Amino acid sequence: MATALITGASNGIGLELARIHAANGDDLVLVARSANKLSEIKAELEQKHRIKVIVLAKDLSARDAAQDVYNETNRADININYLINNAGFGDFGMFTETDWHKEQQMIDLNITCLTQLTKLYLKDMVKRGNGKIMNVASTAAFQSGPTMAVYYATKAYVLSFSEAIDNEVRDKGVTVTALCPGATESGFQAAAAMENSALVKGRKLPSSKEVAEYGYRAMMKGKTVAIHGLLNYIMANSVRFLPRSIVVKVTRKIQDVAK
């Protein structure tokens, strides 16, 4: 019986990935801030799929949160076969006007916690000679992003980090996948206060379920970089052939508040 650890599992892509793993018979360790939501998900998945679900209500932006999660799974003698670093958030606005405390939490969650969880569980996977990691990046990883400067930078880190680590461990039986969705129908936009951005306002966005299913397949195949959607794939790769000054201007235009 395999076990998947999923962060940010209380809604959106994380919740849908939990449902996919449960449907495939995997036990789960689900991590998110909301104890109530996690308890509801635990009851749903255990009853429906007859699997074991452990829930850990934690703020992963807090210092030592990643180590705490690792310690708890070790104490319970749980081997993590799939690590899915999905937890993350963004913020919308000009950098001079956004809140530093929120941005510091964003860096701690999107980068620091993801990196530490990867380091802790990757060592065990390498020792066993098997395991899969999915780090949820974004199409934002492929260019800088005015009005979401820190978020875009954190996702560029996730992409670069994941590609490098995958190269280091692939010959040891472990793969690392960077999932890069574009704008997705989830709670992300509300949390980032970007509902009025031209990037999402009035657009029909892919569902969290669609993105999760694509990401799961990519991880199981051991794909290093998985960009969801043909248009997203074309746009993410086209930036390599354009001057960076042009790319940043176009990104600003796409992201700005819709008129």
Image (tube, rainbow, N blue to C red):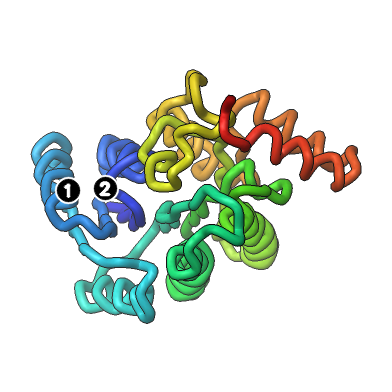
Q: Amino acid at mark 1?
A: Lys
Instruction: Assess whether mark 2 and mark 1 are in contact (beta carbons under 8 angstroms).
Output: yes
Q: Secondary structure at mark 2?
A: loop
Number of the label disc, if any, that sits on residue 74? none
Where is residue 96? Give x, y as percent: 60, 61
Number of the label disc, if any, that sits on residue 37? 1
In the figure, residue 49 lies in which quadrant? top left
Instruction: Give the class, few, some or many, for how many residues have Cα within 10 Å of label 2's Cα (few <14, many ≥20).
Output: many
| 231 lies left or right of 12 | right
The residue labelled by disc 2 is 10
Residue in view at x 70 percent, y 34 percent: 253
- The front one of 197 and 42 is 197
Vertically, is 117 above or below 151? below
**Mark sitting earlier along the chain (1/2):** 2
Residue in view at x 64 percent, y 63 percent: 161
| 45 lies left or right of 70 | left
Where is residue 142? Give x, y as percent: 71, 46
Residue in view at x 62 percent, y 36 percent: 256
- Tag count: 2
Q: Quick one: quadrant of the C terminus?
A: top right
- The front one of 139 and 211 is 139
In the figure, residue 62 lies in which quadrant? bottom left
Where is residue 22? Give x, y as percent: 26, 41
Instruction: Give the class, few, some or many, for how many residues have Cα within 10 Å of label 1's Cα (few <14, many ≥20).
Output: some
Q: Is residue 26 visible?
A: yes
Vertically, is 96 above or below 90? below
Q: CA distance from mark 1 to mark 2?
A: 6 Å
Q: Amino acid at mark 2?
A: Ser
| 124 lies left or right of 33 | right
Where is residue 101? Give x, y as percent: 44, 70
Vertically, is 234 above or below 119? above
